Amino acid sequence: MHSNYFQQLTQGLQQQGTGTPQLILDLDQYQKNLEAVQSKLPAQLKPRLVVKSLASIPLLQLACEKLTTRRFMVFHLPHLLEIISAFEQVDLLLGKPMPIHAVQHFYQNFPDQKALNDQSNIQWLIDDIERLQQYLQLAQNLNICLNVNIEIDVGLHRGGISSQEQLIELLKLIQQYPDALRLSGLMGYDAHVAKLPKILKSPEKSYQESQQTYQQYKNIIQQQFPDLWHADLCFNGGGSPTFMQHCQQSVCNDLAFGSMLLKPSDFDLDNLSALSCAVWIAVPILKVLPYSQIPGLEMLNHLPHRYKAVFIYGGYWQADYIYPEKSRPHMLYGRSSNQEMLQVPAQCEIHVDDYVFLRPTQTEAVIPQFARLYVYSERKFIEWDTFRE
């Protein structure tokens, strides 16, 4: 099945392609993944799309339509402007704390200065008291009110609030300056749940502990700061690796995910088995030699050879070679981002101007390397722009 599929892609690329490496989106598989995700989401969990993992407006538009959402998690300020320009009535949550100079630059260069205070749909992420004080000063200088979402450590240990005392200190400052700061919720990322070796802790126990920690922080807001508690608070959690756990039981009301919709290989997890890879890197073959010749080791040329040497356009991607089967970089020849040499089984019928295919390990680092997605559907290609930022 794989062989026929990639041969079809090769034929299409030879007819419609550019002769350069392309990032291929299998549109049918992407839509199947969206349908599978839609069927799992409970009503109380609002989906939030992670923009860096789906960095193309048409890609995001399809997901928005299928999942009925205008909620986005944004990690780069250029992406923030892209989303504001492309979508109406959005809810934007920053996925990492932004340096104060970056936030200041964003507001100073915002296209419509008169609408600055209308950007109440942006939730800026706060991880400690010093950053909150910086944001307070900026809000006062600009005479605006900033939504602040507090990052909490639910077990990943990548920063954020790690004690009740820290949270109380932040909430008191927010409470003190209601004209400049507005609490919009909490964000607790739990990627460690799926990544932690099972010998240390089971995913089930790790997830339950992270949820208990999250609930404790929610209780502090509701019980000790009732004037900051309101129905629209965003309690964000998740990430693709824990999507299924949150769908079954979650203290959150807002669930972020993105990568799993394209299913790069880093997300080959048991609880995401219903999803399949929808994105490939296609790379033209420049040269085919009967066998590998290693500089300085020419005496090996006289030995029997089980592999051809294939040189491709580019290389060294964050991806694994998938087709032709059993293709791999040569250990002695080394890697190259210009003309990588692959070992391909000698019996494989492959020629110059054919393509090799790779499966990305992740999408957030791979998509920006391509100005466009080559979208494959009904044996034809169309092009979608990416952010490439």
Image (cartoon, rainbow, N blue to C red):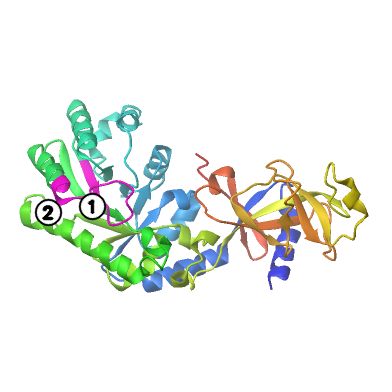
Q: Could you classify mark 2 by the number of other residues whose Cα lies within 10 Å: few (under 14), some (14-19), or many (20 or more)?
A: some
What is the secondary structure assignment of the residue under circle 2?
helix
Residue on which disc 2 sits: 221
Q: Which mark is residue 23?
A: none
> Which one is in front, 209 or 136?
209
Quarter-of-image position of residue 376? bottom right
Indicate the amino acid at tag 1. Leu
Q: CA distance from mark 1 to mark 2?
A: 10 Å
Residue 175 lies within the magenta run: no
Q: Nearer the viewer, residue 104 or 150?
A: 150
Which residue range is magenta in the image? Answer: 147-167
Of all residues shown, which one is farthest toward the right?
302
Asked if residue 163 is among those painted magenta in the image, a careful observer would answer: yes
Q: Are marks 1 and 2 in contact (CB under 8 Å)?
A: yes
| Residue nearest the viewer, comparing 85 with 339 | 339
Identity of the residue drawn at 40% across and 69% down: 38
Q: Earlier in the sequence, mark 1 or mark 2?
A: 1
Whole-percent x and y of residue 68? Answer: 36, 62
Looking at numbered disc 2 in the image, what kind of residue is underneath it?
Answer: Ile
Q: Residue at 13% across / 42% down in the picture?
A: 169
Give left or right: position of 188 versus 361.
left
| Residue 343 point in image, percent of width and height | 77, 56
Q: Is residue 264 above or below residue 146?
A: below
Q: Is residue 371 visible?
A: no
Q: Which residue is mark 1?
A: 186
